[in-house]
Image: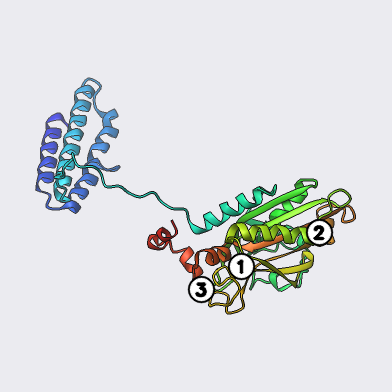
């Protein structure tokens, strides 16, 4: 292309842009002339074929064409999109946007870490993608247990799964550290549950573990009860009491279910506690000796307790949330009520 032909092409492109009727036409012309495969980039790539003595003038003309086309496209695009000049009063103060609020689940996790931090517990973390040993075997869960079925657990292969609880973090902590161990393990967990007002396939747990040497600092069920009673009062307020009921978990012996007295009716019975006066909150117990053997702890030398509860469960009780799905819908109208 000669310089005269280039000038003619430039005039034609600017005329096309001037005649563009809408934003779609402007965009089409942008692609045609300055897009990756447009006319102007093609000319720039072909500069090597221009005679050496003509190359400076030709290159300058191409760059000038490109600048004029981009300027014309910008001006035409603003008009085609209906953009208007700002007609506000810049002397007026800006509109205040309130600060955001923490999500209820975040608030419960942070408050729990604070409460147990006063008792010497530190926060431990672990991966959401786990292996069979950490999630089941080391926790004394037999192979035939229903929790290992594919109808209950998200398996990727025979040894890789999405963790069903945060207990594997306890196993990882014990494998990596010698007693004493005093940790809480907050995190996201996964189970094949049908989502409804009180269940979700993706939820959060906080588990706790305390292990120490039996001869010098024996850990007992009485210690566990006092710790959970302290947590209940700090999280739910004064007047809340704790009840332990016998239960079974593969990784603790003895095992208990933990109830808090209903903070709404103060134990008298209401719709929240289904007229019982109590709300089931956690599972707990003394660490089974077989769990200690799996992590290399001598069960004759060490004792410990463990507990675990659902973060969503605590949040729903504490803030009076009737449907677990509200916690995941990111509705600002709901979240701002808890600010």
Residue depicted at x 79% and y 56%: 304
Q: Secondary structure at mark 3?
A: loop
* Disc 1 target residue: 191
Residue 73 to residue 258: above or below: above
| Foreground label between 1 and 3 | 3
In the rendered image, the residue lying farthest to the bottom is: 275
Q: Position of residue 265 (x, y in %)?
A: 55, 72
Gap in Å between the C-alphas at discs 2 and 3? 36 Å
Q: Position of residue 122 (x, y in %)?
A: 67, 47
In the rendered image, the residue lying farthest to the top is: 53
Residue 274 to residue 308: above or below: below
Residue depicted at x 19% and y 42%: 92
Q: Which one is nearer the viewer's eye here, 127 or 124? A: 124
On the rendered image, what quadrant is the N terminus found in?
A: top left
Gap in Å between the C-alphas at discs 1 and 2? 31 Å
On the rendered image, what quadrant is the C terminus found in?
A: bottom left
* Disc 2 target residue: 220
* Disc 3 target residue: 197
Which one is earlier in the sequence, the residue at label 1 or at label 3? 1
For mark 1, does the 10 Å Cα neighbourhood hold few (<14), some (14 to 19), or many (20 or more) residues? many
């Amino acid at each position: 292309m000669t310089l005269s032909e280039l000038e003619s092409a430039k005039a034609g492109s600017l005329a096309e842009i001037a005649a563009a009727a809408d934003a779609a036409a402007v965009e089409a012309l942008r692609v045609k002339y300055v897009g990756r495969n447009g006319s102007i980039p093609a000319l720039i790539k072909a500069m090597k074929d221009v005679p050496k003595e003509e190359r400076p003038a030709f290159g300058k003309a191409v760059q000038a064409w490109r600048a004029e086309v981009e300027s014309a496209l910008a001006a035409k695009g603003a008009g085609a999109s209906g953009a208007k000049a700002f007609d506000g009063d810049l002397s007026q103060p800006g509109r205040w946007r309130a600060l955001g609020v923490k999500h209820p689940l975040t608030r419960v996790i942070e408050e729990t870490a604070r409460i147990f931090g006063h008792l010497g517990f530190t926060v431990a973390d672990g991966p959401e993608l786990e292996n069979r040993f950490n999630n089941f075997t080391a926790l004394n869960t037999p192979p035939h247990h229903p929790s290992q079925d594919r109808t209950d657990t998200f398996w990727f292969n025979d040894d890789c799964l999405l963790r069903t609880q945060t207990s594997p973090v306890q196993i990882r902590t014990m494998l990596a550290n010698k007693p004493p161990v005093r940790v809480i393990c907050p995190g996201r967990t996964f189970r094949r549950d049908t989502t409804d007002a009180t269940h979700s396939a993706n939820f959060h747990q906080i588990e706790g573990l305390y292990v120490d040497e039996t001869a010098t600092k024996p850990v007992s069920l009485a210690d566990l009860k006092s710790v959970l009673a302290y947590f209940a009062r700090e999280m739910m307020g004064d007047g809340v009491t704790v009840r332990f009921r016998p239960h079974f978990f593969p990784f603790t012996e003895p095992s208990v279910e933990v109830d808090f007295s209903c903070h709404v009716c103060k134990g008298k019975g209401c719709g929240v506690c289904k007229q019982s006066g109590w709300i089931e909150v956690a599972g707990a117990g003394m660490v089974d000796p077989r769990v200690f053997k799996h992590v290399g702890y001598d069960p004759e030398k060490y004792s410990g307790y463990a507990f675990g509860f659902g973060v969503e469960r605590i949040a729903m009780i504490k803030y009076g949330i009737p449907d677990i799905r509200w916690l995941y819908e990111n509705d600002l109208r709901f979240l701002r009520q808890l600010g």
